[in-house]
Image: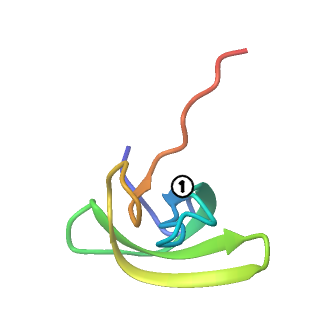
Amino acid sequence: MKPTVARIVHYKSYGTPNGEFTPEHRAAIITRVGDDDDTVDLCVINPTGLFFNQNVNKGEREGQWHWPEREDS
């Protein structure tokens, strides 16, 4: 799938260094697509507010974005 502005993706948060908060998936909206389709700018939606992150790479690790998993009914 090709990322485009306004698509919703998952962003995996980093969590905290001492483990008080573990990495979690957050909803995010693509605000810009980079020169390649693997790097985007995001508006990440957190329970306490919005977080803007630039040049986020595609992947499954902390600090990366990926397409939401598909749920079959």
Which of the two residues, 33 or 18, is positioned nearer the viewer here? Answer: 18
In the figure, 19 relative to 2: above or below? below
**In the structure shown, which secondary structural element does the residue marked by tag 1 occupy?**
strand
Q: Is residue 49 left or right of residue 20?
A: right
Q: Position of residue 30 (x, y in %)?
A: 51, 69
The residue that appears at 60% across and 72% down in the rendered structure is 44
Q: Position of residue 59 (x, y in %)?
A: 32, 52
Of all residues, the one furthest to the right in this rendering is 48
Quadrant of the rendered image containing residue 45: bottom right
Q: Is residue 65 left or right of residue 69?
A: left
The residue that appears at 40% across and 67% down in the rendered structure is 63
Q: Which quarter of the rendered picture does the N terminus lie within?
A: top left
Which of the two residues, 7 or 28, is positioned nearer the viewer here? Answer: 28
Of all residues, the one furthest to the left in this rendering is 36
Residue beneath disc 1:
9
How many marks the image carries: the answer is 1
Quadrant of the rendered image containing residue 55: bottom left
In the figure, 44 relative to 10: above or below? below
Of all residues, the one furthest to the front in this rendering is 18
Q: Position of residue 17 (x, y in %)?
A: 47, 72
The residue that appears at 59% across and 55% down in the rendered structure is 24
Q: Residues within 10 Å of mark 1 (few under 14, many from 20)?
A: some
Q: Position of residue 51 (x, y in %)?
A: 60, 82
Q: Is residue 47 left or right of residue 53?
A: right
How does the figure colour the protein chain or chains?
rainbow
The residue that appears at 73% across and 14% down in the rendered structure is 73
Give the amino acid type for the residue marked by disc 1 in the picture. Answer: Val
